[in-house]
Image (spheres, rainbow, N blue to C red):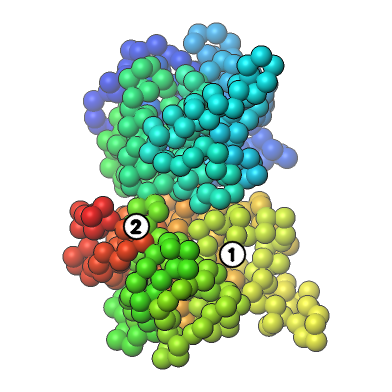
Amino acid sequence: MGVATMQPETSPSQTEGRRVRLSVNGVCKAFAGTTVLQNVNLTVREGEVVALLGENGAGKSTISAIIAGLIMPDAGTMEWEGKPYAPTSPGDAMAHGVGLIHQEMRLLPDLTIAENVFVGRLPMTAGHIDREQMRRRASEQLQRLGLDISPDTPVRHLRVAAQQQVEIAKALTLKARLLILDEPTAALGGNETARLFEQIESLRSEGYSFIYISHRLEEIARIADRIVVLRDGLGVAEHETAQIPVNVLLRDMVGRNIDRLFPHMTEPRPREVLQVQGLCSAAGAFSDVTFTVREGEIFGIAGIVGAGRTELVRAIAGADPVSAGTITLDGTRLALSGPAEAIAAGIVLVPEDRKGQGVLLEHSVGDNLALGNMDRLGGHGWIDPAKIRDFGSRMIERLGVKGRVEQQARYLSGGNQQKVVIARWVARTPKVFILDEPTRGIDVGARAAIYEVIADLAKSGMAVVVVSSDLEEVLGLAHRVMVLARGRQMGVLDRDEASNLAVMALATA
């Protein structure tokens, strides 16, 4: 795979010697004169999992799209099981046995789960859609992934984690011999991830192959046989084992040493900014939740998917109604009827669904930054474009966003899109800053930058609440961690007593 930055000092992969299923040789690709892949080589053998690592923009999605027939390479060749392979469409690739699960979910919200799983290939009997067969086969895959839900449920009623599992179920019904999984666990909790890994292990034992793309390096050691690293469109390292120290992989990915992923934390101040007492969800997602967050504290909320974490912070931010309990901010009890009242009071939320709820992709970075700050950028019912440009430039510089004020948000990396959402609210200097899944789908280098931003929010005196499915993230950032399970508060752990084992023991109690 190009010229590796180092040679692994561990034993060869256990899959060495198996039949080569896919071979990518010298593939190049450029868009609008910008080279995104340069002479990339990749080999995937029968029954192995190859991890493809790299920062956002390294070329992982582009090489995956070429393999899956979404785009054509400018140069280079591919072989599938020893024969020339040059798919011209996803259907062509699927006919060979290659399936791709996209990082960004592409489900049709008004169709049912079963219809989404089989869209484009509906089972037919005597010229009619066999809905019973469709529901049965979809239900089988959902149960294999541990998703206990009716296949007749419309997708729009599912939360992000459940939608991701539907994407995975869809791919498993394709019976592909090579599955490309692009951030498949980004929206999954620990139990759901474990179930997915069990399924991958089962399929691998039957000879199925995988290209596995993830920013969660702890997953790579658990699931992969080999590791290939891309940087700036080049293949910079290939390791014949997944048991590689994290600092080595980080150096491969970013081209420099990263001394630490999580920033040094300062101690919070004693004054309590946010007090939540006996809070209950009107929809039954959580009940009787009580906690406080101090000035300068990062308060983590952990729990498996379905624990009620997102619903809780949405309620605190005024987005979801409550049936009982109180929210007190700086000694004043709030009665929130919507997010606007929460924002006015000093509580802001960065939502878990960045593209669906946080960023307007078709609008400029400046317009996105102006959202939530319109009262400061105009007067008498008019918005001043010059003020938007000036405001946008200042916030881009303050948060280190790699983008321009006039640039469409869709062309920013995931990490920079997240910085834009954070910058929007930083400008208001809120009292409580809530971040739900702050680094989902963001590469390691950008994650470190986001963590620095979060630490700086706390250092400035804000009360910060972080919800994450990534337990390492919660433990690395939070001064205290509250654990939820099935909508119930199981306990609050101080930093010195919070550990993977302690959190999971409460989350699964």
What's under tag 2, amino acid-wise?
Answer: Arg
On the image, numbered disc 2 is attached to which residue? Answer: 486
Marks counted in the figure total 2
Quadrant assignment, res 212: top left
Crowding at label 1, few (<14), some or many (≥20) Cα neighbours within 10 Å? many
What residue is pinned by disc 1? 420
Question: With respect to residue 183, does 262 lie above or below?
Answer: below
Q: Nearer the viewer, residue 55 or 419?
A: 419
Can you give x and y, in whole percent of width and height, for residue 219 in the image?
A: 34, 41
Residue at the spot x=49%, y=27% of the render? 136
Task: Locate residue 118, reporting x and y percent.
Answer: 59, 28
The CA distance from mark 2 to mark 1 is: 33 Å
Q: Earlier in the sequence, mark 2 or mark 1?
A: 1
The answer to whether any part of residue 62 appears in the image is no
Answer above or below: position of 17 versus 460.
above
SS at badge 2: loop
Residue found 67% across the figure and 55% down from its top: 361
Q: Nearer the viewer, residue 36 or 362?
A: 362
Q: Which residue: 20% across, 58% down?
A: 502
Under circle 1, the secondary element is helix
